[in-house]
Amino acid sequence: MKQHFTHSSYDGQLIEGLMTHIQSAINRLTYGFSIKNPYVESIKFNFTHAFEEAVRFKAIIEKEYFVMIDDDETAYIALHFEAFYERLPSAKKGISAVLVCSTGLGSAQLLAARIRKYFPDIDIKAIYSLQEAMDKDITSDVVISTIYLEFMDMPTIVVSPMMTREDIKIMEQSLVQLKHATPAGINPFLSLLREENCYAQADFKTMEDVIQAIGTDLIAKGYATEGVIESAIQREILSYTSFNALATPHADPRFIQKSNIVVMTLVEPLLWGDIMVDKVFFIALQNDQTLDFERVYEAFFNLLDNEHNLQQLTAARTNDTLYQLLMKGDTYES
C-alpha cells in the first residue's frame, strides 16, 4: 500500500498516518461499517486545500481497492493533510518581519521576545537601529517599529518596546489586513473577479445545467478550454462542493486558460448534492506560480463568513449590482 503515498513533498508522518487510517477505513468499508463525522462542513470550509487533496487521494484508493469513501471519511483524511501543511516551515512562519528600534539593543531584544511569544507565525528576519534601517534594502512582508518611519514605503506597524495589550490588539488587526492583501494592496479574490463573469438571478434547475452554462461561457470567452465542463462535473461526483446554501465547483487547472472566478446567483434554489443552493462560485484557477492560492481562498472565505453580505448578494437583481456588491470593501468585513 505504501507505494501509493510516496509523493516527494510528503513527510513520513503524513504517509504513516494515511496508511494507518486507510487500512482501518478499508476494513470498515469492506464489512459495511461507516463512521459519522460531525465536522464535515467545517472541514470543507476551513481546510479547503486539505480537503481537495483528500478528494484526489480517495479517488486513488477507491479505484485500487474497490470501495466507496464518503465525505465523512474524506473529511477525516483531510485532517491528516492539514496537519502536514501545519508542519511545513512556510506554514509556521507565515509572515516575515524586520524590527526597527530606536531605544537600544536591550529594548529591541525584549520586543523580539514578546513578538515571538504572542505571534509565533512571524519570522523575525533582522533587528535594525533607525540608522541601519535607513541604509538597508528591506524586503520583508512587514516592518515592526517603535517609532514612525516616514521614509518607509512598505507596511509598517508601530508599537512600544514593551508590547502592551493595546499594542497586541494593533498587531492582530494589522496582521489580518496584511494577510488578506497582496503586496500591491489588492484583495487577491477581487483581482479574479470580472463584471462579465457575474450573473444575477440566473434560472437553472439542476447542478449540471449550471456547470454546463458557466463552462460554455468560459470557453467562449477564452478563459477555459474544452474539457472544463466534464472536469467540473467529475469533481462533483467525487464529492459535492455545496455547503451553507452555496457551491464552489471547480475544474482541473489544465483546462483553465486564465484564472478567474465566476459568480452566479439563482432565481430559485436548486439541489446540489443533498443541499439546496442559491449561490455558485465557480473557481477557475490555473497552476499559476505568481498566484497565492492560500490568500485567494482566505479572502474568499472571509466573504463567505459574513451572512449579511451573502444575503445582499442573493438579493441583487442585476449583474452590475452583484459585481458592485462583491467589489465593495465592506463586503469582506466580518
Image (tube, rainbow, N blue to C red):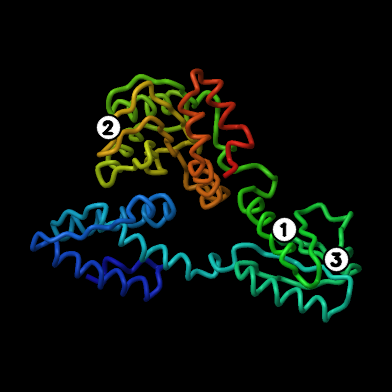
Closer mark to the observer between disc 1 and disc 3: 1
Determine whether 31 is above or below 260 in the image: below
Image spot of residue 330 (x, y percent):
62, 37
**Marks 1/3: CA–CA distance:** 22 Å
Residues at circles 1 and 3 in contact by the CB criterion of under 8 Å? no
Report helix, strand or loop for mark 1: helix
Report helix, strand or loop for mark 2: strand
Amino acid type of disc 3? Ala
Q: Which residue is mark 3?
A: 133
Amino acid type of disc 2? Leu
Residue 191 as seen in the image, left or right of residue 7: right
Say few, some or many: other residues with alpha carbon within 10 Å of mark 3 (under 14 / 14 to 19 / 20 or more): some
Q: Quadrant of residue 173?
A: bottom right
Q: Which residue is mark 2?
A: 271
Image spot of residue 25 (x, y percent):
19, 65
Amino acid type of disc 1? Ile
